[in-house]
Image: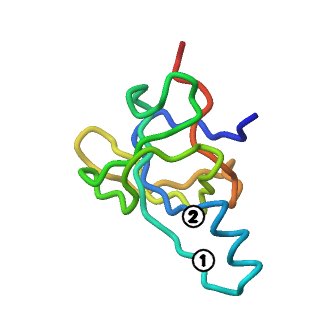
Amino acid sequence: MNTVMDFDRPTRVIMHFREDELRSAKTGVRLVHYQVTIDPDPSWYDPERRFIRFNHQDNSEVHGWVPIDSVVIDSLLATLEGEEWRPVKRPDFQEGESAVREALGN
């Protein structure tokens, strides 16, 4: 079962891959972090909600379909409000919480 976070609007985050975290712990190689946009639009998820799609058009540094269980969110940066990105702070956010979104609203 996925550990997930629910975003109600496009949100920019800093994330890393869980597999890279494990590899980094074993080898001592620096863990690489990426900025991506997580969008609640159902078209960004596969029908079983196991994968999320990241896209370069929204300035994401990751591109393509990624297993949700692989995504570890390290920091929330901003949300899209209308046409404007605004910094976000969420007191309920737990750093290192895995994955992206639980439900697509149906």
Q: Earlier in the sequence, mark 1 or mark 2?
A: 2
Tell which of 27 and 39 is nearer to you. Answer: 27
Tell which of 24 and 6 is nearer to you. Answer: 24
Q: Amino acid at mark 1?
A: Leu
39 in relation to 91, above or below = above
Count of picture labels: 2
Element assignment for label 1? loop
Q: Residue drawn 69% across and 48% down?
A: 92
Q: Amino acid at mark 2?
A: His
Q: Residue drawn 68% across and 69% down?
A: 21
Percent from the top left, x then y, of residue 59? Answer: 29, 58
Q: Is residue 69 left or right of residue 52?
A: right
Percent from the top left, x then y, of residue 84? Answer: 26, 48
Q: Is residue 69 left or right of residue 59?
A: right
Picture disc at residue 16: 2
**Farthest bottom residue?**
28
Picture disc at residue 31: 1
